[in-house]
Image: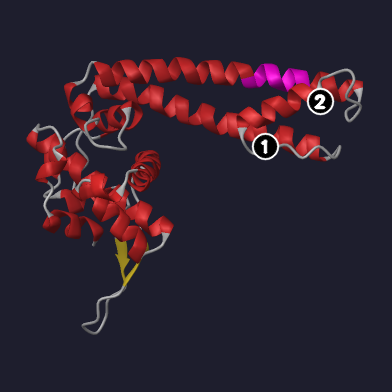
Amino acid sequence: MRFVAMKTVEQQAALCVHRLRQGVVEERTALINRLRGLLTEFGVVAPLSPEKLRRELARCLDPDDLRLLAPVRELVRDQIVALDQLEARLAAYAEQIAAQAKHSESAKRLQTIAGVGPTTAAAFVATVGAPQEFRNGRQFAAWLGLTPKQHSTGGKTRLGRITKRGDAYLRTLLILGAKSALQAALRKPPERRHRLQQWIVAVLARIRYHKTLVAIANKHARVIWALLVKGEDFDVQHVTPKVLAVAAA
């Protein structure tokens, strides 16, 4: 049996900021969806982007705009104030998380990976108490739910979808970081891509977009485990083709 390593009081305190930030993000998303739903009742189809939504709300609050009645405008103003408060809290939490990443050597080390920012690095440092508990990077990726389910029988190996077990917050951060790494690889000219970016582009050409993101997140998880255990910075020039092939498996 594998037992979860106990977290220190400092780690628990650091995780509080991440959990509260995650809750505020959900509240903001719910508020934006409510606003878009209310506006749709009056024939105002607001864009999905929060920035574009704010511009549309500003037009709706214009006295010369007759799409909304006066009582509805007041309700919209109240919701905008609530949205501003949520975004102010998000900004405050982001500053605290950035401070955590700045004062942690392990978090600084993780940020040497393309696609791993301060939030992801601080979240891993606060969540993973003892990375040595995992025998290898694959076990660490499995703990995060980034490895496929086994449906093997009769000597036949069948792999299904990823398990999605473990910490959903960490897994989400890795997927978002994978999107950033993929876009960076696609933007760079082919002759200037390093070995890791060449692998990312090759994986995208072989499998679909979302599977590519999972493969990149899986690779990032394995690299994060190695950096936490060995205490070294990530050097992309030392990533061998064998390591990349294993990360794609």
Q: Is residue 111 visible?
A: yes
Neighbourhood count class around disc 2 (C-alpha, 10 Å): few under 14, some 14–19, many 20 upward: many
Farthest bottom residue? 154
* Labelled pair 1, 2 in contact (Cβ < 8 Å): no
* 213 to the left or right of 197: right
Q: Is residue 89 magenta?
A: no
* 7 to the left or right of 133: right
Q: Looking at the image, tell me whether mark 1 or mark 2 is earlier in sequence order.
A: 1
Foreground: 230 or 23? 230
Q: Secondary structure at mark 1?
A: helix
Pointer 1 residue: 33
Q: Which residues are magenta?
A: 76-83
Please identify the quadrant where the C terminus is shown: bottom left
Residue at coordinates 21% horizontally, 32% vertically from top-left? 112
Residue 41 found in image quarter: top right
Q: Amino acid at mark 1?
A: Asn
How far across and down, in percent of the image, does residue 248 sit? 25, 59
Residue 132 found in image quarter: top left
